[in-house]
Amino acid sequence: MNPIALQISPSVLLVESDPVLAGQISEDLQTAGYQPLIAPDAKTGWHQANLNQPHLIVIARMLGSESGLELCSQLRREENYVPILMLLLRDTLPDRIACLEAGADDYFLKPYRREDFLKLIHLYLKPETYPTDRLHFGDFILDLSTRTVLRDREVIALTMKEFELLKYLMEHPREVLNRDQILENVWGYDFMGESNVIEVYIRYLRLKLETHGYKRLIHTVRGLGYVLRES
């Protein structure tokens, strides 16, 4: 058998307590070429995530009487950094911030829409090709092939969206980038949200990058945007 033909489809773990919705999404994922894994509750979702190590995880915010946000937080605390998308019933700033604080990379608003959902899944699972393997700025190294960040040889764990945000800043060092540029180039689709979400991402990215007394590299330019510079 030709080994080239043995191509494994990306696996997507869906944690959703509604069996009808879970069945519909599973069928759509399979038709689109993905390998769906279904979990009806947080406990099963946690076991599936650790046992099968999916390429992407989709979690409903409400899992019956359980919180999908807590499952997301637990996975992040255990250093599981695959992309996580949350299924939300409401599109409010507090809801989005709660997703970010739990460690989610993105969200999808119910009711379920097949085309928009698969577009978002493809955005996170599409193959990445880079002209160079690494980006450098100061004592930062961004390894694009392994999607890791090093500062003074120390590995810093980032979520996918945090990594993409830092990558975009490092691709434009010392250039002031406004919120619209960041939304367009980091999210890459119609985000349908206020730019306040970017401020939350910047805040959490700074917390991770400035541990152990490291100096600040991501600066706010009031009224304009953000810039990556030494001082």
Image (cartoon, rainbow, N blue to C red):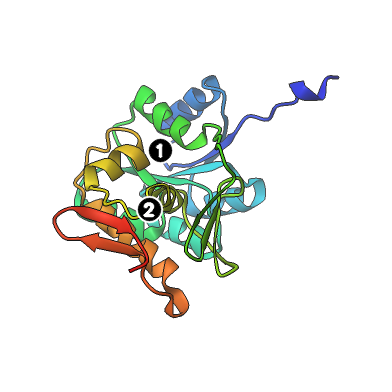
Task: Return the x and y of residue 183 as percentages of the image width and height.
Answer: 28, 42
Q: Name the residue: 38% across, 56% down.
A: 69
Q: Which residue is mark 1?
A: 18
Which element carries disc 1, helix, strand or loop? loop
Q: Quadrant of residue 190?
A: top left
In percent of the image, x 50 and y 27: which residue is there?
29
Q: Position of residue 45 (x, y in %)?
A: 53, 49
Is 96 left or right of 130, judged from the image as shown?
left
In which quadrant will I find the C terminus?
bottom left
Nearest the eye: 16 or 50: 50
Front-lying residue, 220 or 8: 220
The answer to whether residue 138 of the structure is visible from this angle is yes
| Residue 186 pos. (x, y %) | 36, 42
19 lies above or below 106: above
Q: Is residue 176 left or right of residue 78?
A: left
- What's the mark number on residue 114? none
In the rendered image, which residue does mark 2 sit on? 173
| 135 on left or right of 69 | right
Q: CA gap, disc 1 to disc 2?
A: 46 Å
Give the crowd class for mark 2: few <14, some 14-19, many >=20 residues within 10 Å. some
Q: Residue 131: where, in percent of width, then height?
A: 55, 37
Disc on the earlier residue, 1 or 2: 1
Q: Amino acid at mark 2?
A: Pro
Three-letter amino acid code at disc 1? Asp
Q: Residue furthest bottom?
A: 213
- For disc 1, the neighbor class at 10 Å (few under 14, some 14 to 19, many from 20) is some
Q: Is residue 67 visible?
A: no
Left or right of 181 in this view: 150: right
Q: Are marks 1 and 2 in contact (CB under 8 Å)?
A: no
Nearer to us: label 1 or label 2: 2
Quarter containing the N terminus? top right
Please name the residue shown 40% across and 27% down the image: 119
